[in-house]
Amino acid sequence: MRGEYAKGNMDQTTITMAGPWIAAVKDVLLGFSAASAALFAYLGLSAWRNELKGKSEYELAKRVLKAVYRVREAFKTVRNPAIYEYEFPEEMRDFHGHLKPEHDYEGTLRVYEKRWEKMDQPFKELEELHLEAQVEWGPEHQDVIVNLRRCRSEVLLAIQQMLRHKKNPREEPSKAAELAEKRSVLYHSGGDQDKFTPQIDAAIGEFEKWLRPRVRSKG
């Protein structure tokens, strides 16, 4: 009996002595679990933020590129060499739907005013998105839009010169080479005489070079 009592007393003493160690180990394990949970939560949050940022940049790149392509289509509309009957104001058309000679200037002016509206809106949208892209990615590519602006200005100038000539037909006619250059800027033909469309395509290509890698990396 005494031996059993001594043994039991020793076990109790061992438990009493081990108690603080067990508690300490428990605290360490709990602390480690909490730290691990916090770490995994942080990593998960970081991954989520990175994914969200990547998605945001991808969407912005797509929006800018779509705006660029809308501008490209607007150039085609404005520079279309064919003017259709419905583009002329009804009161300025003859029985066959052609523009009456006495309304040559006013009718053509109305046509190009309407066409230019289709350039203004997409270009305004592109300008705003280009600024947004600079906020997102920095000013490194702030000049990527410069050549497209130049193309837009040249087309507008060619339209103004053509309208001025219609308004004042007695003005001294342009030289053949100058006239050919103006017609190349003013009209989209796609042939060898169209020297201006490749310049527009090159300006569009600058955006594609900038944005395509961002679109492909997400896809």
Image (cartoon, rainbow, N blue to C red):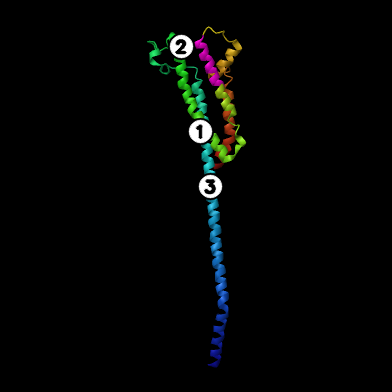
Tell me the residue that label 2 is attached to: 104
Residue 56, position as x, y percentages in the image? 52, 42
Q: Which mark is residue 11?
A: none
Q: Earlier in the sequence, mark 3 or mark 2?
A: 3
Q: Amino acid at mark 1?
A: Lys
Q: What's the residue type where badge 3 is placed?
A: Glu
Kindly indicate whether the residue at mark 3 contacts the one at mark 1 (C-beta within 8 angstroms): no
- The 10 Å Cα crowd at callout 1, few under 14, some 14 to 19, many 20 or more, is some
Which comes before the other along the chain, label 2 or label 1? 1
Question: Nearer the viewer's eye, disc 2 or disc 1?
Answer: 2
Q: Is residue 117 visible?
A: yes
Q: Which residue is mark 3?
A: 51
Task: Please tell me which residue lies in front, 135 or 215.
Answer: 135
- Mark 2, secondary structure of its residue: helix
Q: CA distance from mark 1 to mark 3?
A: 22 Å
Is residue 170 covered in magenta? no
What main secondary structure does the magenta stretch of the protein show? helix
Q: Which residue is mark 1?
A: 66
**What residue span does the magenta drawing correspond to?**
154-168
| Residue 190 makes an appearance in the image | no
User: What is the x, y in percent for residue 191?
Assistant: 56, 18
Q: Which sits in the foreground, 208 or 134?
A: 134
The CA distance from mark 3 to mark 2 is 58 Å
